[in-house]
Amino acid sequence: MTELGLSFGRIAPEYDAVRPDYAPEAVARAADALGLGPDSRVLDLAAGSGKLTRALEQRFADVVAVEPNDEMRGVLAQRSPQVSVLAGTAERIPQPDASVDAVFVGDAFHWFDGGAVADELTRILRPRGGVALLWNHWWSDGDDRTSNSLDPPLPAEAQALFDEVYVRSGRAAQRAAMADPLLALSADRFEPLAYEAFPRFEELSRREVVDLFTTVSAVASLPEGERDDLKRKLEVLLGPSYRLKIVTDLYWTHRV
């Protein structure tokens, strides 16, 4: 995982408080599609602060969460004391061979080394084990700017502030060079990916928009004082309320 991918640890409590939950329907669909039951052993990979972990522990009795960042893992362990929380990366998962029924990944698969994580998934999954990849889409990366699903749209000056940070942080260059992460799940080891989307809308205040949008990696990587200054500038520019479309994208497959 890159430095930008690990930058969320700088804002771990804030990230946990304001990032959207995954659509419950998406988690239920993944469990059904992968043939999982309450006694299945599942692993949340790059679990962050536990947004997805908490949804999994409501459904499964045996949940393992693996997260490389100390700060994010601390929030996760505090909020999910019944879950086995381990330090580790997607490229070196601290689990024995053929030990889990399914691996879930929330908003993180694009940060992984695709070849290495495919090897690890193949190693730790039981025969016919499943993989579920989820993303909450409300913010999209482009090569040199970002987009979002706010209604009304961000004022041009606010958008320009985000785009400047996006480029300066190195995230734009990284995004332009990034291969499609889904290509890591090659046909010789995994079945063709299936896909389903789960859209919803949330009403957000000005402050809620600022808090949410400043949890993206480019902004999270900034020094604290610079992040705070950006928040103050955005507060002046934004309107009083917004409607945000959030789409939980779900991809799933089985190990062959």
Image: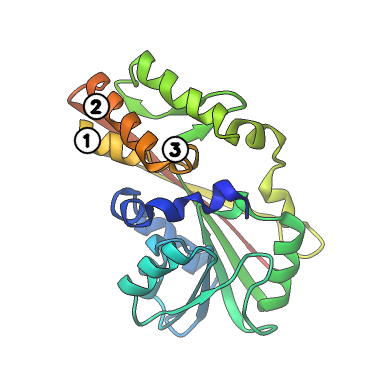
What amino acid is found at the position of numbered circle 2 in the picture? Glu
Against 1, is 180 above or below? Answer: above
Mark 1–mark 3 distance (CA, rounded to whole Å): 16 Å
Amino acid type, label 1: Arg
Front-lying residue, 39 or 65: 65
**Residue 184 visible at all:** yes
Residue located beneath label 1 in the image: 207
**How many numbered markers are drawn?**
3
Earlier sequence position, callout 1 versus callout 3: 1
In the image: residue 179, left or right of residue 7: right
As measured in the structure, the alpha-carbon distance from the residue carrying label 2 to the one carrying label 1 is 7 Å
Front tag of 1 and 3? 3
Mark sitting earlier along the chain (3/2): 3
The reply to whether callout 3 and callout 2 are in contact (CB within 8 Å) is no
Q: Residue, x 44% and y 41% (percent of image)? A: 216
- Colour mode? rainbow
Residue 163 position, x and y percent, is 49, 24
Task: Single out the residue that lies furthest toward the right.
Answer: 188
**Residue 47 image offset from top left, x and y in percent:** 48, 64
Q: Quadrant of residue 51?
A: bottom left
**Hey, which residue is sitting farthest top in the picture?**
156
For residue 169, side relative to residue 137 (left or right): right
Identified at 67% across, 48% down, the residue is 181
Looking at the rendering, in which quadrant would you find the N terminus? bottom right
Q: Spatial distance from mark 3 to mark 2, Cα to Cα?
A: 15 Å
User: Which comes sooner in the sequence, label 2 or label 1?
Assistant: 1
Residue placed under numbered mark 2 in the picture: 235
Task: Return the residue at label 3.
Answer: 219
